[in-house]
Amino acid sequence: MSALHVSRVRALYRRILLLHRVLPPDLKDLGDRYVKDEFRRHKTAGSKEAERFLQEWEASNSVLWQQANESRQNSTEKACFGISLPEEKLNDFRDEQIGQLQELMQEATKPNRQFNITESRKPKL
């Protein structure tokens, strides 16, 4: 991974963990674990894979930032986080990634959470 990628990765990693501070505690914990695991897994990624990884996480961070702001503005409603993944994106995933998404969805949808994940036929992030 190039020095530019390393710098972008570190900055993005810090931004994501800072953003997680405004989330409900159980979602923060889940998100922190997931982010740390994903960044660890991609530590040795090639340049092309690293660029795609960064683009996806930057987009995800942007969406989460917007949802967190909306949640703060509508403090009387239960917070709602997540996005639907289009089928064409899911088709690009490896079996291991699909398994990780399923585990994340199961963890995120356990009863008594302090947040909602919108129901849909597609997995949520």
Image (cartoon, rainbow, N blue to C red):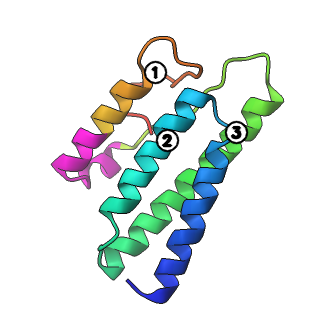
Among the two numbered marks 1 and 2 on one chain, the one whose residue lies closer to the N terminus? 2
Quick one: label 1 or label 3, which is nearer the N terminus?
3
Q: Secondary structure at mark 3?
A: loop
Whether 42 is drawn above or below 82: the answer is below
Q: Amino acid at mark 3?
A: Val
Q: Tell me which residue sits at (38%, 73%) in the image.
A: 50
Q: Residues within 10 Å of mark 3 (few under 14, many from 20)?
A: some
Image quadrant containing the C terminus: top left
Q: Residue at x 67, y 18 (%)?
A: 78
Q: Which residues are magenta?
A: 87-100
On the rendered structure, is 30 left or right of 20?
left
In the rendering, at what x and y percent does residue 93 appear? 25, 52
Query: Is residue 9 inside the magenta stretch?
Result: no
Report which residue position mark 3 lands on: 22
Between the C-alphas of marks 2 and 3, the distance is 12 Å
Q: Quarter of the image holding residue 47? A: bottom left
Please tell me which residue lies in front, 118 or 5: 5
- Separation (CA) of disc 1 from disc 2: 19 Å
Residue 95's disc number = none
Residue extending furthest left? 95
Q: Nearer the viewer, residue 38 or 50?
A: 38
Point out which mark residue 31 bears. Answer: 2
Q: Does the image show residue 97?
A: yes
Amino acid type for the residue under numbered disc 2: Gly
